[in-house]
Image (spheres, helix red, strand yellow):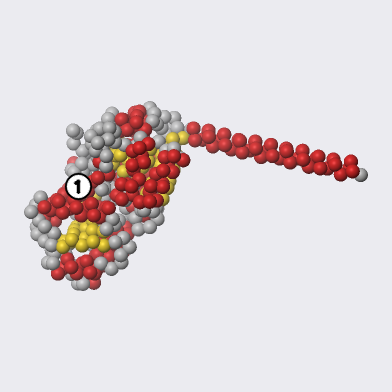
Amino acid sequence: MAQLNRWPSQDFGELTVKRSLFAFAILASTALTSAAYAADTIKIGLSGPFTGGSSSMGVSMRDGVKLAVAEINKAGGVLGKQLQLVERDDEAKNEVGVQVAQELINKEQVVATLGFINTGVGQAAQRFYQEAEIPVLNNVATGSILTNQWPDAKANYVFRNAANDTIQSAMIAEEAVKRQGFKKPAILADSTNYGQLGQKDLTEALAKMDIKPVANEKFNIGDTDMTAQVLKAKEAGADVILTYAIGPELAQIANAMAKLGWKVPMIGSWTLSMASFIDTAGPNGDGAMMPQTFIESPTTAKRKDFIEAYHKAYGGDRMPSPVSAAQGYDSAYLLVAAINQAKSTDGKKIKDALENLQTKVEGVVTVYDHPYTAKDHEAISSNIPVFGLVKGGRVVPAHPEDVAGDKALRIKPKS
């Protein structure tokens, strides 16, 4: 009887061992498959705010990048490998952006990252890429400082293909003072790094024209009533409102002006083109003007194809943030051109290739012909953006003559 009890136990033990060995084999096979997949792909980080008040920019940028990567992979990928995007939502929060950067670099081991929507997040997070010698392409964030945070560094791994705030502030001042003749501007800017650095750039641009703002008001992200700030501008005798902020708060400025029955032009940074401004402000937003590197209009064959492909992939009849989508798309092709030229995914070699691209990259915004050098990491020059105008829920050219004929495609002058 004792012997009969012993054999089932031994059989059960053997079965357990067999099951364990089988499970281990599956795990090993999965690990090998994952490793093989990783070896056959090139990981690219994709970082931006995909939720929250900045999400119309972040999601549009992400969609533009994904559209480009799908085209690139369909055409055979890069260096015989497929691109693999590793997406992370930085929530437009500096501390989250820092965590995302560290995870993409250390855990995911990306060869480069595309993104940064918010200037503050870029300032806080891109230093990790600089230290790791991994390129990061700012495809939306516009704070002028971003490509020159470390002026004494031997090498700079931060690039940009968006119109920085030095360019935009000069355009805003030019439009308001020289083109439209206003003399008493009021500046309304949010309290973020983006808003305050932009306000500084704008004040300096106005000073070059011997113009001093009659009011300089600040507000916080999430504020829903700008009546106090707008009233101060009105009482100061402002004849135009100049802005540096993000869409939802910008809409509250337009709504406060309507509430007070006070109508003066609103001219600001490119973010006035965001869906969160246009939709929240409604008719109160009509007439707002802003610099744009891309207006959703098929003015070139490349733009026509991009617009059609975007809506086929994501639906709708209007991009939430056309500038973000176009610049996101272009950033992927710029990075791929550099990887192809470098014939490597080594960060230093990619950086060197970006600084001396030998092939032209036909983008949506422009044709990139040697867009970067070792001393110039800005792909967008001051001649490229034009002014957009909010009209009937869309952004259209403010000055049609600026995009007519051979002016439709503007290219950065060669150094």
Residue at (16, 54) in percent of width and height:
203
Residue 153 percent across, percent down from the top left:
27, 35
Q: Is residue 17 left or right of residue 254?
A: right
Displayed quadrant of residue 237 = bottom left
Q: From the image, tell me which residue sits under label 1.
A: 166
State left or right for residue 1 relative to residue 353: right
- Give the residue furthest to the left: 210
Looking at the picture, does residue 396 appear above or below residue 363?
Answer: below
**What is the count of numbered marks?**
1
Q: Quadrant of the C terminus?
A: top left
- Which of 84 and 213 lies nearest the eye of the viewer? 213
Residue drawn 57% across and 37% down?
Answer: 31
Left or right, residue 103 beside residue 146: right
Q: Residue at x 11, y 52 (%)?
A: 207
User: What residue lies at 21% left-to-right and 62% top-to-bottom?
Assistant: 217
Q: Residues within 10 Å of mark 1 (few under 14, many from 20)?
A: many
> What SS does tag 1 mark?
helix
Is residue 187 among the parts visible in the rendering? Answer: yes
Q: Amino acid at mark 1?
A: Thr
Q: Residue 391 appears at what percent x and percent y?
A: 24, 59
Whether residue 271 can be seen here:
no
- The image position of residue 230, as x and y in percent, is 20, 67
Residue 253 image offset from top left, x and y in percent: 24, 64
